[in-house]
């Protein structure tokens, strides 16, 4: 990993300086639950190396980033009772943390998500968030 960027919340998570409910760790990527999920189980995948936006992603990280996103999307439905997932990447606009991240959000028909209006929910407590992370980790291990 290159040097973390000072003040970057995701660099601090990757470095282990900030807590997160980690779902997936690989040599090049890390995935953790969003603290303000659209739906419970909403996961963010980031490159371990600080990269600001998708256009900045170096070629050597493109495949690990996409395969990590793909693995999360495939793992999400069964353990969360979802029918599929929504995957999105923001670049600058609507990117609350300027570190590339893919949103992988569990979806069910009639869940209320319309267009790009993302209602937010909350985990009841840290234990509930930890349970969602554990279920996703187990599905990824299968």
Image (cartoon, grey):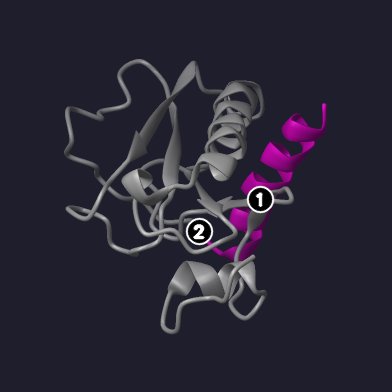
Q: Within the image, what quadrant is residue 137 found in?
A: top right
Q: Quadrant of residue 15?
A: bottom right
Q: Main secondary structure of the magenta part?
A: helix
Quadrant that contains the N terminus? bottom right
Q: Secondary structure at mark 1?
A: loop
How far, Cα to Cα, is label 2 from label 1? 31 Å
- Part of the protein shown in magenta: 125-142
Q: Few, some or many C-alpha atoms within 10 Å of disc 2 (few <14, some 14-19, many ≥20)?
A: few
Q: Residue at x 30, y 50 (%)?
A: 120
> Residue 17, image x and y in percent?
62, 81
Give the foreground label among 2 and 1: 1
Q: Give the left or right position of residue 121, taking residue 35 as reference.
A: left
- Residue farthest to the front? 59
Q: Name the residue at the bottom extreme.
A: 6
Residue 94 rendering spot, x and y as whole percentages: 20, 53
At a point 44% along the width and 47% down the height, the residue shown is 57
Asked if the magenta segment contains residue 126, the reply would be: yes
Q: Is residue 121 above or below residue 62?
A: below
Quarter of the C terminus within the rendering: top right
Q: Is residue 135 left or right of residue 54?
A: right
> Magenta stretch: residue 99 in it?
no
Task: Decide which of tag 2 and tag 1 comes sooner along the chain.
Answer: 1
Question: Residue 98 is drawn in which quadrant?
Answer: bottom left
**Identity of the residue drawn at 28% across and 45% down:** 90
Q: Residues within 10 Å of mark 1 (few under 14, many from 20)?
A: some
The x and y percentages for residue 104 are: 46, 36
Which dot marks residue 45? none
Is the residue under label 1 in contact with that under label 2 (CB below 8 Å)?
Answer: no
| Along the line of sight, the residue nearer the viewer: 105 or 47 | 47
Location of residue 80 in the rendering, given as x and y in whole percent from the top left corner: 59, 30
Q: Which residue is mark 1?
A: 28
> Would you name the residue on which mark 2 appears?
124
């Amino acid at each position: 990993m290159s040097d973390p960027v000072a003040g970057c919340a995701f660099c601090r998570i990757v470095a282990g300086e900030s807590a997160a409910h980690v779902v997936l760790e690989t040599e090049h990527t890390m995935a953790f639950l969003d603290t303000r999920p659209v739906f419970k189980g909403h996961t963010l995948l980031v490159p371990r190396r600080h990269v600001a936006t998708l256009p900045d992603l170096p070629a050597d990280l493109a495949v690990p980033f996409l395969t990590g996103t793909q693995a999360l999307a495939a793992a999400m439905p069964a353990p969360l009772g979802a029918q599929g997932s929504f995957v999105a990447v923001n670049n600058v606009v609507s990117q609350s943390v300027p570190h590339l991240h893919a949103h992988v959000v569990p979806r069910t028909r009639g869940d209320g998500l319309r267009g790009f209006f993302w209602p937010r929910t909350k985990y009841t407590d840290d234990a509930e968030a930890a349970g969602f992370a554990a279920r996703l980790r187990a599905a990824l291990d299968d």
